[in-house]
Amino acid sequence: METLHFTRPARAAEIQPALVGYVGSGDLEVMIEPLQGSQTEIHIQTSSPGSEIRWRQVIEQIEARISLPAMRMDIHDFAATPGVIRLRIEQAIELASAVEASA
Amino acid sequence: MTELTNTALNRTEQLGFIDLSARKRIESLLDSGSMRELLTPFDRLTSPWLEKQGIVPQFDDGVVIARGKLDDKPVVAAAIEGGFQGGSLGEVGGAKIAGILELAIEENRKGNPTAAVLMLETGGVRLQEANLGLAAIAEIQSAIVELRQYQPVIAVVTGPVGCFGGMSITAGLCSYLIITREGRLGLNGPQVIEQEAGVEEYDSRDRGLIWGLTGGIQRFATGLVDAFVDDDVSALSTCVRDCLAAGVPTLHRSDDIAAPLKRLQQFDTREQIDAQRARFTLTQGKTA
């Protein structure tokens, strides 16, 4: 198991807590909680060692598509592929931002 | 042809239970909007033991517990996430189930009738947490034995994991046990038996043999479970409510062991077991 930590610039936004996925084979759980300020903290525990570059790339791909809201994101990864990781993270951000969209 | 179309249409109206997550399973069975989860993932109560062994934890430790209502009556519910570590029970997940059952006992003592529904998808104790998991299962079992005197404790085993190990004993202690065709119930899992007895005697890849002996149909036919239902949320929901309405059984299955014990004692283990012989052994003298 490997523990990774990323801090990224983000926009201040009103979001709600969100949880998607589970820690099963080829899947991951992503938990989001609001964070004051203008950055996003990402804490990852992954069963795949040596995957830091891959995670950085996935996060950059997501940033290229959506502007991250300020949040704390916790990830428990059980050997998910980059495609599944991206899908789950985007799903979690969408769920967390639902309050923003309806406001 | 018309009949076929109707069947196909009905099938699309069914909502499968097996594919639902533990959290969604509870939500789908309880009265709409009544579910209130306790110790949610946001409480971050993870297993303190898995990380030490290099295993990625899950925020709810694979167990969801909640209070809610069934037909407007207060109940507690617990569901195990079979996909996380095979639905194994460790210190935290086990304590969550024991805790919610003890909460129901407290409510009954105070004069507030509160039943329990347990959705069991589990291989039993989590080996990485050995003794702590075993202790938690013992606590769950003693809580069930106390709670079932007041109100029904209803267990649901739908698959895909099934219910094995110490948790199969837990299931056996419940007031009512509901199973689907996919569901399995057994003390040892197929691979454990194969490892112990040899592949000639018990091939864990032989699905016909495995389901023939431990699957829902066989368990229902031999009277080890009370109800057999389709993998359908509404059918399951009706069945759970029927069990609740039936109240506390006059005789619990686990207190009614003389006859089955006698049948097992007469069983000749020298001959290879199969589904038909198992059914005959467990039902002789009971059914025509």
Image (cartoon, coloured by chain):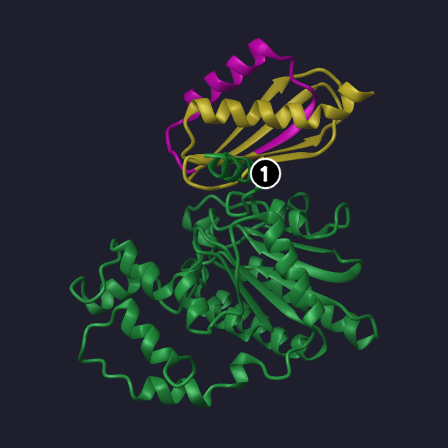
Chain colours: A yellow, B green
Q: Is residue B131 visible?
A: no
Residue at the limit of the structure toward the left, as seen here: B200
**In the image, B99: left or right of B272?**
right
On screen, residue B47 above or below A93: below
What is the magenta range? A47-74
On screen, residue B91 above or below A30: below
Give coordinates of residue A20: x percent, y percent: 59, 34
Residue B77: quadrant of the picture: bottom right
Magenta-span inclusion, residue A55: yes
The kind of residue on which mark 1 rests is Glu
On screen, residue B270 above or below A13: below
**In the image, A102: left or right of B256?**
right
Residue B248: quadrant of the picture: bottom right
On screen, residue A53 above or below B25: above
**In the image, B222: left or right of B226?**
left
Chain name for mark 1: B
At horizontal 48% and vertical 19% (from top left) the residue drawn is A58
Q: Is residue B261 visible?
A: yes
Give coordinates of residue A101: x percent, y percent: 76, 19
Image quadrant in which the N terminus of chain B is located: top left
Give coordinates of residue A59: x percent, y percent: 52, 19
- Which residue has dot 1 on it? B13
Give coordinates of residue B269: x percent, y percent: 22, 80
- Dot 1 crowding, Cα within 10 Å, few <14, some 14–19, many 20+: few
Image quadrant in which the C terminus of chain B is located: bottom left
At horizontal 75% and vertical 46% (from top left) the residue drawn is B32
Q: Secondary structure at mark 1?
A: helix
Nearest the viewer among B217 and A40 is: B217
Nearest the viewer among B167 and B129 is: B167
Residue at the limit of the structure toward the top, as seen here: A64
Magenta-span inclusion, residue B54: no
At horizontal 25% and vertical 53% (from top left) the residue drawn is B205
